[in-house]
């Protein structure tokens, strides 16, 4: 499919499937077990109706806002996803350039194919860093020092992955990184396929190296290890959101890891309102999972999210057309958001309020 002919995220997805080898496509597209949560993330948005306002002056719309103090041109951030060089040769460099061109934030994964220093050097906008905590706390602290020195502005701690969910597409494909690609921020352990055929290379890497004992008490250690604001990613319960605030989190990302961890977890948009209410303005709340349309962004903002993060749509764009494709993914969502705001009677982000959204019965 010609990139210029892709006018929706769904069309970019179809183009990406054609462009990617089966192992890479399975890794990007797949979820855990029966992929119930993967499907639920997108389906839940279809169950929400927009009760639009009329006779509102929307001749001029303003999509810009701030997220944790960072000014963005639109409230659509690039979520942390691993291994962008599976999609295109420039990998995370293409992604960060696309995010900068869109005027938004890029959250770089620990499991990137490009070093954090190179990504931040190529950035024209804010870069946040998503952190996995390794059993070797010394190595983790050394990584944090690198992230700070490189110029990342926030640390995003993933809290829903003590182990990696069983992603059956990856097991069937015996997923591992192709020759020449590796994890550039933390080396070791993933460049060769594990001997057990019942798991993917990523499952083995996480089981061997990441800290499965990470708990709430360790947030004090992390706060002492960094000067950066900490955002917790992977929360689906109001009580955990409250604990996050009490432990000093500056922000929360309502996330179920894109349906890739616990299958049967709730769709993120379904739990967002209760989490926003529980946090009660003490920290900013963001959301990822299942966002494929500008109307989805409106629904998330109306239910209290300060911004949304998109992962797979960016990967589809990278696979379909490299940096230009990633730019196109963000441009599509920006255009759709602008139109949805106009049709909802919302001239500004702040005018997108909860009364716009009702559950379809």
Image (cartoon, grey):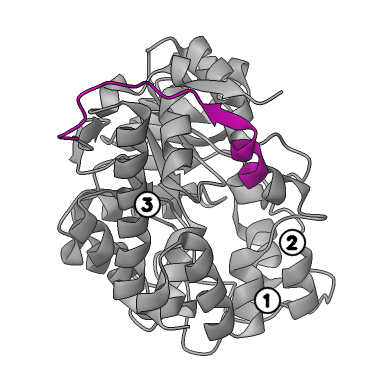
From the image, tell me which residue sits under label 2.
Answer: 167
Question: Which quadrant of the figure has residue 64?
Answer: top left
Q: Position of residue 71 (x, y in %)?
A: 18, 38
The answer to whether any part of residue 144 appears in the image is no
Distance CA(mark 2)–CA(mark 3): 28 Å
Above or below residue 91? Residue 149 is: above
Examine the structure image and report whether residue 47 is included in the region drawn in magenta.
Answer: yes
Nearer to us of marks 3 and 1 is 3
What secondary structure is marked by label 1?
loop
- Over which residues does the magenta segment extend? 41-61
Mark 1 vs 2, N-terminal side: 2
Nearer to us of marks 2 and 3 is 3
Above or below residue 338? Residue 181 is: below
Mark 3 vs 1, N-terminal side: 1
Above or below residue 284? Residue 140 is: below
From the image, tell me which residue sits under label 1.
Answer: 175
Pick whichever, 327 or 89, lies toward us: 327
From the image, tell me which residue sits under label 3.
Answer: 333
């Amino acid at each position: 499919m010609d990139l210029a002919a892709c006018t929706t995220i769904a069309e970019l997805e179809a183009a990406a499937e054609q462009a990617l080898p089966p192992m890479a496509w399975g890794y990007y597209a797949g979820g855990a077990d029966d992929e119930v949560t993967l499907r639920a993330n997108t389906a839940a948005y279809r169950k929400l109706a927009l009760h639009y306002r009329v006779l509102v002056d929307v001749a001029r719309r303003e999509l810009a806002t701030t997220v944790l103090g960072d000014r963005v041109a639109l409230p659509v951030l690039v979520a942390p996803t691993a291994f962008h060089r599976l999609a295109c040769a420039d990998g995370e460099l293409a992604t960060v350039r696309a995010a900068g061109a869109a005027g938004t934030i890029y959250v770089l994964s620990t499991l990137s194919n490009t070093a954090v220093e190179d990504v931040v050097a190529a950035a024209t906008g804010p870069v946040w860093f998503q952190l996995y905590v390794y059993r070797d706390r010394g190595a983790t602290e050394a990584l944090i020092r690198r992230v700070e020195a490189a110029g990342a502005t926030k640390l995003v701690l993933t809290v829903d992955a003590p182990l990696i969910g069983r992603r059956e597409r990856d097991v069937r494909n015996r997923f591992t990184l192709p020759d020449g690609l590796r994890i550039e921020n933390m080396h070791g352990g993933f460049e060769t396929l594990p001997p057990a055929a019942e798991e993917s290379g990523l499952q083995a890497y996480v089981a061997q190296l990441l800290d499965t004992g990470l708990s709430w008490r360790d947030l004090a250690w992390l706060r002492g290890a960094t000067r950066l604001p900490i955002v917790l990613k992977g929360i689906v319960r109001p009580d955990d959101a409250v604990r996050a605030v009490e432990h000093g989190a500056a922000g929360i990302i309502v996330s179920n890891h894109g349906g890739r961890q616990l299958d049967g977890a709730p769709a993120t948009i379904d739990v967002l309102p209760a989490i926003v209410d529980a946090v009660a303005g003490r920290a900013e709340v963001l959301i990822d999972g299942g966002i494929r349309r500008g109307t989805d962004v409106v629904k998330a903002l109306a239910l209290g999210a300060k911004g949304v993060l998109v992962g797979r749509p960016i990967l589809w764009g990278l696979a379909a057309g490299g940096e230009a494709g990633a730019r196109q993914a963000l441009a599509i969502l920006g255009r759709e958001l602008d139109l949805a705001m106009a049709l909802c009677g919302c001239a500004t982000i702040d005018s997108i309020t909860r009364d716009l959204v009702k559950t379809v019965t």
